Image: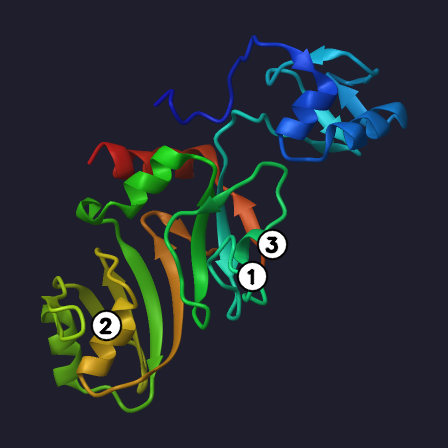
Amino acid sequence: MGTWRISGEYMEKERLNKYLAACGLCSRREADRLIEEGAVSVNGGRAVPGMQVSAGDQIMVNGKSIHGKDEKVVLAYYKPVGVTCTEKDKFADKKITDMVKFPVRVTYAGRLDKDSEGLMILTNDGGLINAMMRGSGGHEKEYVVRVNKEISDEFIRHMAEGVYLSELSVTTKPCKITKTGKFTFKIILTQGLNRQIKRMVRELGYHVYAIKRNRIENITLGNLKPGQFRRLGEDELHVLYKSCFFE
């Protein structure tokens, strides 16, 4: 599992201002200013202009640790309703890349609609993103859904068996679904068709009012509130990477 470990030794040295800029923290000129002001420390000592560092050094800016530019970062993020999963759409009021401020640039592995909320995985690991997006992977994603009218036993049965989506000319894979209330159900999908839940529900004569994703594989929202994120721990990463690359 050495390809994903978030710690390690990096022997290549480079100027501190260049290193901070490569981490996405600031420009080189801004890095020079921070160093001169005494805001940067390296291995517990005050940094000096022109010093050489590597990712194996403990680098802090204003008391906060800076993560290595080559380090694999994986975050769990609670996307609120109204945030768009895009990086470049100039018409989007709230882009996901503007909402999550992290020293290392990360992007999303899988999307949620603007009017949906819940768990997203953000990372700088392109291999993990590709593995999670691969349709044949069968990675579990769990949602709680509210619809516009009372849920029948027939609705649950049809959803579980698979629904023919006329817009896509495809039948969804069988899935696990549980009625949790008069108008709500929990569903676990292993495929990622575009707007899949909304399309399935619409084919059966219902309308979705709200969707919340609670889990992706072994990663859950936990205590996160809308707009918050957290870095995944070693144990979570081990299980996630194993499910994406070795099963």
- Residue 115 figure quarter: bottom left
Depth order, front residue of 20/184: 20
Q: CA distance from mark 2 to mark 3?
A: 35 Å
Q: Which label is found at residue 90?
A: 1
Q: Residue at x 83, y 24 (%)?
A: 35
Evaluate whether residue 140 shows in this view: yes
| In this picture, residue 203 sits left or right of residue 219 | left
| In this picture, residue 36 sits left or right of residue 145 | right
Q: Which label is found at residue 142?
A: none
Q: CA distance from mark 2 to mark 1?
A: 39 Å
| In this picture, residue 51 sits left or right of residue 200 | right
Q: Which image quarter holds the N terminus?
A: top left
Amino acid type at mark 1? Lys
Looking at the rendered structure, the number of numbered marks drawn on it comes to 3
Amino acid type at mark 3? Asp
The earlier-in-sequence mark between 2 and 1 is: 1
Residue that sits furthest to the right in the current view: 37
Mark 1, Cα crowd under 10 Å, few <14 / some 14-19 / many 20+, is: few
Amino acid type at mark 2? Thr
**Residue picked out by circle 3:** 98
Evaluate whether residue 223 shows in this view: no
Q: Nearer the viewer, mark 3 or mark 1?
A: 1
Measured as percent of width and height from the top left, residue 163 is found at: 13, 73
Q: For mark 3, give the secondary structure.
A: helix
Q: Which image quarter holds the C terminus?
A: top left
